Image (spheres, grey):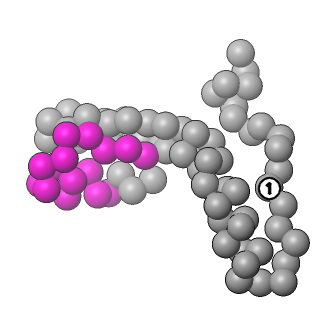
Amino acid sequence: SGASMIAAAAEKGAGAFVSGDFKYHDADLALELGIGLVDGGHYGTEAPVLPVLAKELRQATALDVLVSTVSTDAWNDMF
């Protein structure tokens, strides 16, 4: 998730840290350091880059790379 870099981001003067997965203690540390957290969720931060990665893989290999169109976003799919 990169949460181990919250303190470094705060030291560099960042106002917010974006990730796809924070835990309770990550939020507690961020609060203590005065840095905001944006939790975009795994799906929300990973799915948008898949077409780009697929294109790169197609260009670098002879593979037929497909990106699934099935949503696996549990946070949105449960409602």
Which of the two residues, 55 or 50, is positioned nearer the viewer here?
55
Q: Quadrant of residue 55?
A: bottom right
Task: Classify residue 16 as left or right of residue 55.
Answer: left
Which quadrant: the C terminus?
top right
Residue 76: image location, x then y, percent: 67, 25
Q: Residue at x 58, y 39 (%)?
A: 44
Highlighted range, magenta: 4-19
Q: Name the outermost residue toward the right.
A: 64
Taking the magenta stretch, the answer to whether it contains residue 17 is yes
Q: Can the viewer see residue 28 in this picture?
A: no
Taking the magenta stretch, the answer to whether it contains residue 53 is no
Which of the two residues, 39 or 52, is positioned nearer the viewer here?
52
Q: Amino acid at mark 1?
A: Val
Residue 77: image location, x then y, percent: 73, 25
Which of the two residues, 73 or 51, is positioned nearer the viewer here?
51
Q: Residues within 10 Å of mark 1 (few under 14, many from 20)?
A: few
Q: Residue at x 19, y 47 (%)?
A: 14
The residue at which mark 1 appears reads as 67
Q: Residue at x 19, y 40 (%)?
A: 15
Q: Residue at x 83, y 41 (%)?
A: 70
Q: Quadrant of residue 18?
A: top left
Badge 1 marks a residue whose secondary structure is loop
Q: Is residue 32 above or below residue 5?
A: above
